[in-house]
Structures are given as C-alpha cells and as structure tokens.
Amino acid sequence: MNRFAIGFGCIVAATALAPAPGRTETVEENYRLYCVQCHGMAGTGQGVNQTAGGLAVSARDHTSAEQMAKLTDDEIRLAIAKGGDAVQKSELMPPWGDVLAAKDIDDLVAYLRKLCKCAAAK
Amino acid sequence: MARYRFPIVAGSGLLLAIVPAGNATALDGKAVFAEKCASCHTAAGPAPTTFQGVLRRKAPDLHYAGSKFKREWLVRWTQNPTPIRSSGTMFLNHVVTEDGKDRIDSRTVLSCPSRLSSQEAETVGDYLMSLKDPNMRIGVVDRNRKFSTSVALRLFTKQYPCMGCHTVKIRDKETGGVSGPPLTDAGERLNPDWVYARIENPQYWDPKTWMPRIELSHEKRETLTLFVVAPK
C-alpha cells in the first residue's frame, strides 16, 4: 500500500463524508435559522418578533391543524419561496427562494405537516 | 560614569526609534485589536458558512469594517461600548420559551467588555477602516436625495418585511422586531453604501444570515437606505 493509494483513499473518504455544497443544514436547523424568529421555537407563531410586537399581522401557528389544514402543500411552498404576498397573505412573511434550495423548501413543507400533524388541503 | 554614557545615549536613541511617535498607524491598531478585541471579533473572515458556525459567533464580523462603519463612530464607541443588539449577536442563543411564547433573556446578552483609551480607539479606528470589501460599490447612494418619509415608512412597514425583524423609531416610539439589529441610530454608525449593499445581497456579507434577500428596484432600495440612515 503506497502513499499515493493512502492519499487517494483519504481524498475519496473526505469527499464522501463532506456535506454536499449548499446542503449542510438539516430541516430542523433551517427552521430554527429562518422561521423561528417569527413562528417561534415551538412553532406556535410566538417567536421573538411576534412577542416583541413587531408583527402587525400575527405569524401563523404551525402547530395548529385547523390553520395548516386550510393550505395545500403548493401554497406553503409558494409562501416560503415567494413570500406571503404570493399567497395573498401578509408581506411580513419574507421570500426565502433566494436562500433555500427547492429541496430545502420541500423538506420544510414536510416538517410543517409533522408540526401540525395534519394533511394538506385538497 | 563616562563609559556608560554612550550605551545609554545609544539605547535611548534606539528606544525612541522603536516607540511610534506622532500619528497612530494601522500597525498599532492591529496589535491593540489582537489584544483587546480579537477574542470575540474576527478581522480575517470569511463569515461562517454553516448554521452551527453562526451559533458559535461571539460578536459581529469585522473583516469588512472599513466598508461598513463610520470611523468617527468606531472611535467613539470603542471608548464606551454600550450595547447595540438587545438580542445579542445571534438571537437564538438568547431565546427562552415560556408557555409556548419566546422572549429574549437579556441577562444572557453580554456587553462588550473591552474599553479602549482614546489613543487606542484612534489606532483601532484606523486599522478597522483599512479593512475594506473589494467589491462594494462606492457612491451608489445619493445621500443628498430628498425622500418622502411616508413613502419610506410604507416600504419599511407595509410593503416589505423589514420592521418584522428590525426596530426603528417612528413618531418617537421604538417599534419593530428584535431578531435583527435595531436600526434606530443606524445612521450614526453605518456607511449608507454598505446599508444599500447589505439590503441588496445580505448573503454576500453573511451566507447564513437570517435576513431574506428581496428583489427591489434601485429607487426603492435607495429610499429604504436613506430612511435607515436618517436621524430618527
């Protein structure tokens, strides 16, 4: 086993173990980084910006099956990517489409369905 | 005693040559920064590229301080570092949840413990102002442009989500969110060209910032910038 083989093996291992570019975060981490500031650590819509009185329109309660079941997955996807205005909701919901990849947004939609324990509207 | 005179004179001359005299130099500021600031602030970059890296950041990045700040504010503030961000450098590190409601635990938000002398502040000011971003456009904001406060307020509070995360003073009342830095006195500390650039592409400055990137015309972005840096 020469040094070249060992070195090559190390490179292969490092590449296999390294996170994919732009996909270093779990869905929980993305939710914490981008969503929690308004929607809260518990997802109830009581994030620090809400409780500080910064939101003229309340952030949605992601744990509410009643609220979340009204939305289709596509509506949630669009709200995350293009902002609240794109789904006739408050502009206080920012667009994250320049920040999150499509797969990240799909993962978040699935995560939100877990939070509300509810299915998408038909 | 005569045999000691030459070494004393020579030694004194050498000492005078080593001790910097006259105006502060960037090199001195770098040393003061290393001693008094670098345990929390980075002057080297790059900004963290992971969520965990953002959580670990103790104080704002300063590797583009010369593009971001006004020198006079840096020199003044470092002599008396009063808190700027009530939610800390990263708000998630200071959130407590009670009965399903989040709030910032201000007891965990620590002020900058360093306090510079006036001479140190001048040298650190010089050093930090030498740290420029090579890509930031200079002079993109027309600082003399008159803007309508009501138009700016509509943009800031209704059409775009700015006030959701940033506190400003409107009609003498501080209002807005707290997950982003307050902007009430932003004009005292920030370069308008940097504010413009930050709004244009927050992720350029901080890849894992929790500020969204929003498409805006130059006019709207300039209006928001002028509003942010205006005295309130």
Image: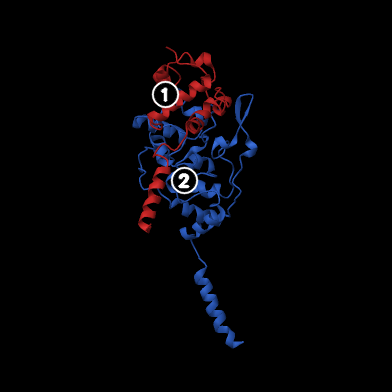
- Residue B11: percent from the left, percent from the top? 54, 77
Kind of residue sitting beneath label 2: Lys
Outermost residue, top side: A122
For the C terminus of chain A, give its image quadrant: top left
> Taking the image as drawn, is residue B146 in sight?
no
Q: Which residue is mark 1?
A: A83
Are there few (<14), some (14-19), or many (20+) residues within 10 Å of tag 2? some
Q: Nearer the viewer, residue B214 or B90?
A: B90
Q: CA distance from mark 2 to mark 1?
A: 34 Å
Residue at horizontal 44 percent and vertical 13 percent from the top:
A121
> The chain coloured red carries which letter?
A
* Left or right placement of residue B198 versus residue B176 in this view: left
Q: Is residue A93 above or below residue B198?
A: above
Are there few (<14), some (14-19), or many (20+) residues within 10 Å of tag 1? many
For the N terminus of chain A, give its image quadrant: bottom left
- Residue B49: percent from the left, percent from the top? 44, 42
Q: Quadrant of residue A54?
A: top right
Give the structural element (helix, strand or loop) at label 1.
Answer: loop
- Residue B70 is marked as 2
Specify the subunit that label 2 lies on.
Answer: B
Residue at horizontal 52 percent and vertical 29 percent from the top:
A36
> The chain coloured blue carries which letter?
B
Kind of residue sitting beneath label 1: Gly
Circles 2 and 1 in contact, beta carbons < 8 Å: no
Q: Nearer the viewer, residue B220 or B104?
A: B104
> Taking the image as drawn, is residue A26 in sight?
yes
